[in-house]
Image (cartoon, rainbow, N blue to C red):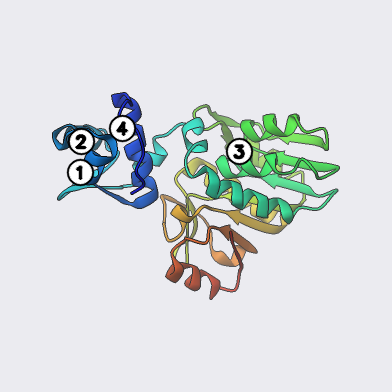
Amino acid sequence: MTELRLEDLKIEERRKTILELLHKEGKVKVIELSKLFAISEVTIRGDLDALEKEGLLERVHGGAASNYKSYYNMNLNDRMETNQEEKRKIAIEAASMISDGDTLILGSGTTPLYVVRELKNRKNLMIITNSYSVAQEAGHNHNIKVIVLLGGNLNPEYQFTSGDDAISQLSRYKADKLILSSDGVSAEFGVTTYHHLEAELNRQMIARVNKTIVVADFTKIGRANFAHIAGLDKVDCLITNENANKDEIAAIHDSGIEIRLV
């Protein structure tokens, strides 16, 4: 665990940092956290107990393990700050696959938002999205000529729309490529999401494009979440990080899809 000078963090900030470490590493140990924050093991145990009561981690002997609920309980801004560098690398690679004049569908989530930021040098792009954040970010780019923001039921916390109205509007369009974020990608269960209300819209997005590009940082590889979006046979390319689970990456590769590691 990286040594940081975090002695002066307030309780809320310290606990947020603990959750971020859990998200990245899967487990944390009381003795290591005590050294990291330069506070007593008793205080750290109190932090872990409090976070467990909130359902954000699971206490195990000597520390705590991630139950992955911590990430889902973050708001969009907090998610943007989680695994920033990994997501940025994925976004750069995804942007390299976009050509001038492309029509794109972008799903919701933080990684598509990073992708939009990397499209500043592309010209005459047309974007369809159900993400308010993506639409707002794209609106600052003068090279993106048209933005279609799908209406529907709004999730204000994660700033995306879903439902019959969004699906109906989407059916009017055909696009070159889809940039789809996912909460889980596995050889066995395919592409999954925590947000079941968005899953059907995601399936329709796949049906409306020539090429589906799934962007998922290393923490999502090998995970299966609540709602199934599609099997890997519906995916053309997966972009993830070099430190993703190697066995799972090999199994996903055996399905025949292109994998780009960054």
Crowding at label 2, few (<14), some or many (≥20) Cα neighbours within 10 Å? many
Q: Nearer the viewer, mark 3 or mark 1?
A: 1
Residue 44: give its label.
Answer: 2
Position in image of residue 75 (x %, y %) = 46, 31
Q: Are marks 4 and 1 in contact (CB under 8 Å)?
A: no
Q: Does residue 109 show up?
A: no
* Mark pair 2, 1: CA separation: 6 Å
Q: Are marks 2 and 1 in contact (CB under 8 Å)?
A: yes
* Residue assigned mark 3: 164
User: Which amino acid, by three-letter code, is at mark 4?
Assistant: Arg
Which quarter of the picture shows residue 33?
A: top left
- Which numbered disc flags the more N-terminal residue, 3 or 2? 2
Which quarter of the picture shows residue 145?
A: top right
Residue 30: give its label.
Answer: 1
Mark 1 falls on what kind of element?
Answer: helix
* Mark pair 4, 2: CA separation: 9 Å
* Mark pair 3, 2: CA separation: 47 Å
- Which numbered disc flags the more N-terminal residue, 3 or 1? 1
Is 182 situated left or right of 74 in this image?
A: right
User: Which amino acid, by three-letter code, is at mark 2?
Assistant: Ile
Residue that appears at 30% across and 38% down? 56
Q: Nearer the viewer, mark 4 or mark 3?
A: 4
Residue 15: give its label.
Answer: 4
- Which numbered disc flags the more N-terminal residue, 2 or 1? 1
